[in-house]
Image: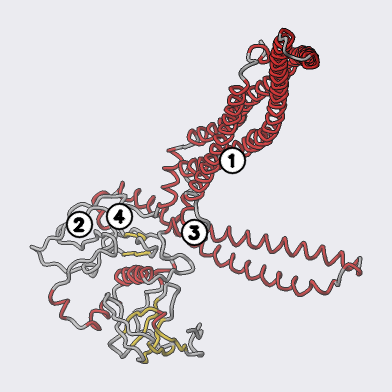
Amino acid sequence: MSWGTELWDQFDNLEKHTQWGIDVLEKFIKFVKERTEIELSYAKQLRNLSKKYQPKKNSKEEEEYRYTSARAFLATLNEMNDYAGQHEVISENMTSLITGELTRYVQELKQERKSHFHDGRKAQQHIETCWKQLEASKRRFERDCKEADRAQQYFEKMDADINVTKADVEKARQQAQLRHQMAEDSKAEYSSTLQKFNSEQHDHYYTHIPHIFQKIQEMEERRIVRIGESMKTFAEVDRQVIPIIGKCLDEITKAAESIDHKNDSQLVIEAFKSGFEPPGDVDFEDFTQPMKRTVSESSLSNSRADGKSEPKFGGKSKGKLWPFIKKNKSPKQQKEPLSHRFNEFMTSKPKIHCFRSLKRGLSLKLGAGPEDFSNLPPEQRRKKLQQKVDELNRDIQKEMDQRDALTKMKDVYIKNPQMGDAASVDHRLAELGQNIEKLRLEVQKFEAWLAEVEGRLSMRSEARRQSGLYEAQNPSAVNSCAQDRESPDGSYTEEQSQETEMKVPATDFDDEFDDEEPLPTIGTCKALYTFEGQNEGTISVAEGEMLYVIEEDKGDGWTRIRRNEDEEGYVPTSYVEVYLDKNAKGAMTYI
């Protein structure tokens, strides 16, 4: 099967067919280019999608990724990023192995095709020229034969005419012979040209054209093979990344299987556990019998959660809710001057604790978080303090590593002075030593707070245990037991019952409010801004007003001041400029 023998007369069709083959190849190249662009675009969109949902650094989202479900989602995002990388690999390989190679091959193919068809056209032109020569020789032979025939007829006519001279007859005879000779020469030339043409035509159709067409056939077959190989490469490029893509999908599946709902539930407990007990039942207050109103009527706090109180008639109400829940005040209380109600409030120990809770709550709303995290529930405060201690210890380790490195560098400088001046690192070593000392002091401070919180938690556990034993032995006196609870803001409240002799270990915090004597003045302050004291225990001040300081900020963002003997209360520390008396105990000047 050869184009040279089977398609010897289809030169034009072969030219069109080979051009169509090149067009198909170029179309495939264009298809692969568009595929690579799609792969790149898809990879870019996947990367952007993965980046969009990645947790932002130093944000709350990072804390959420301690849960196994969130970590699995993060692993999925990372695997999708790798998945996008494989699509980039597909694009790169298709560009280098298919698009680039085929583009160069198409240029070579066009040049080869042009050369072959140029040779074919040249052979066609040659055979056409030979044919024209044969036609010319044939026409000349035909013309000479006709001329010789006419000359012979003229000679015979002249020879038969008796009136024609002998000279004219001789002349006609010579002319006839000349024409006859010319016809013979034309015949010989035509015969020779015909033989030559037949030879050229044979060579053209049996040698030259088959050879040229064979080259064109081989060229076209190579093109077909090449496009087939490119299609295989197209599939192979995809197949090569399938194991890696499968591995990415396996990792996503593995991450999904690593989700532990029990562990996440435990982490929620650790994250939000306050350490408080649920409030107990509210005691029944019998208003049909004369009774002395309790001092805790205007501010309810917590009741014991590990023992239910029974209704009591004629006794003091010990049932409490959270300290921020307040009862409606009676008209009499609403009409009383603020100073009288404040003095009554400050002389009540349980109410002082509630005021501390309110004060810390207001400080949280104003954005002033204490350094010791006293605004947090005990369990959360313990965790925050532990985190702070760990963070400071890591900082200390970094500083010590730097100091060790500089010490080694100094030793090298001492042994090899040409490498540097040993005294040049002394200043930095001194700075590192100071930093380490400061950090150690900070660690001691936070460890002291941590020990205090852990001690209180252990005392509360012991108190609950003793209270449980007491209630089991004296169920009738459950509602008369002393209560030792923490409010949700981290402060402590304690009420001593007069109806039982049960003792709960007291803390240093309770001693702070034992003294009911008026506090002495420790300095003065100037109001920088106007403050409207709308909550009980606070005092309103006007901008520029001068007042007396009777209690400095304890770290909760509030300062206790006095206007006169009857008006005193708390204002935000950031609202005043404080000038403490240097002779006062523990006084310090700050703005």
Callout 4: SS: loop
Mark positioned earlier in the residue sequence (4 or 2): 2
- Between 356 and 263, the residue placed more toward the observer is 263
Q: How is the image coloured?
A: secondary structure
Disc sitting over residue 88 in the figure: 1
Mark 3 surroundings: few (<14), some (14-19) or many (≥20) residues within 10 A? some
Question: In the shown orientation, is residue 582 left or right of residue 201?
Answer: left
Residue under label 4 = 304
Mark 4 surroundings: few (<14), some (14-19) or many (≥20) residues within 10 A? many
Residue type at mark 2: give it.
Asp
Residue 571 horizontal/vertical position (percent): 35, 80
Q: Residue at x 50, y 86 (%)?
A: 589
- Between 43 and 172, the residue placed more toward the observer is 172
Residue under label 2 = 283
Callout 2: SS: loop
Residue type at mark 3: give it.
Lys
Q: Is residue 33 above or below residue 322?
A: above
Q: How many marks?
A: 4
Distance Cα–Cα, label 1 vs label 2: 72 Å
Residue type at mark 4: give it.
Arg
Distance Cα–Cα, label 2 vs label 3: 36 Å
Mark 2 surroundings: few (<14), some (14-19) or many (≥20) residues within 10 A? some
Q: Is residue 473 above or below residue 440?
A: above
Residue 199 shows up from this direction: no
Residue under label 3 = 384
